[in-house]
Amino acid sequence: MNYPADYLDFLIHFHCDRDYFECHEVLEEYWKETDPGNRESIWVGLIQTAVAFYHYRRENRSGAARILRKGINILKQHPSSLKGLGIEIDRLFPLLEETLKNIESGKKYQSIDLPLNKELEQVCEQACLRIGNSPVIPPSIIHRHSLRDRSDVIRMREEALFNKQKQKD
């Protein structure tokens, strides 16, 4: 079966280097290209799942629980699409619900592997062998959002604010 390249990149980051921030970045671009504006898109559900794990690992339990609940609710709307993406839904939802309980009860972060069909498991296993699958996640991945260069985003926001104020005058 053919899977979108961005989706495969998402899975590889989710399973190999546990770079949940990159999962979000990769799949957000794909979502914006293929299903823009649809806040109930399966892609949004997968993005929110990755973001929840990002927050969970950083011990932002309230944010992790809130976003994981949203992701689960969206994903539950798309069982046939999840199956089409090679995700075993009979195992996915209990795993995500268990993770949600762990977050809410204050248990320490623990990564998971999304339950995939054999073909995708092999893709991820081969990628992990190629890029590495270390149990030690560097701070540059754990705290990715606070370490990235946001000067372009800040400049664009300042320009937009300036233009908005200019239009008012």
Image (cartoon, rainbow, N blue to C red):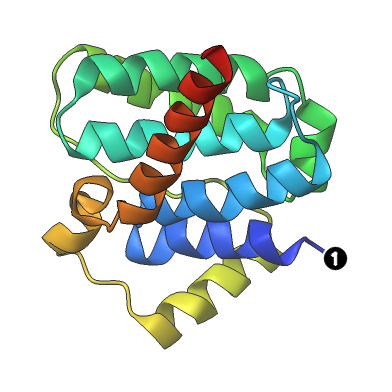
Which quarter of the figure has residue 59?
A: top left
Query: In the image, what residue type sits under mark 1?
Result: Asn
Which quarter of the figure has residue 110?
A: top left
From what the image shows, is residue 132 above or below residue 143? below
From what the image shows, is residue 18 above or below residue 134? above
- Residue at (34, 65) in percent of width and height: 17
Image side of residue 60 versus residue 54, left or right: left
- Residue at (77, 61) in percent of width and height: 4
Q: Which residue is mark 1?
A: 2
User: Circle 1 sits in a helix, a strand or a loop, which is it?
Assistant: loop
As rendered, which of 27 and 80 lies closer to the eye?
Answer: 27
Location of residue 7 in the rendering, given as x and y in whole percent from the top left corner: 66, 56
- Residue at (67, 38) in percent of width and height: 43
Location of residue 12 in the rendering, given as x and y in whole percent from the top left corner: 51, 65
Q: For the N terminus, give its image quadrant.
A: bottom right
Location of residue 158 in the rendering, given as x and y in whole percent from the top left corner: 38, 37
Number of dots carrying numbers:
1
Location of residue 63 in the rendering, given as x and y in whole percent from the top left corner: 29, 19
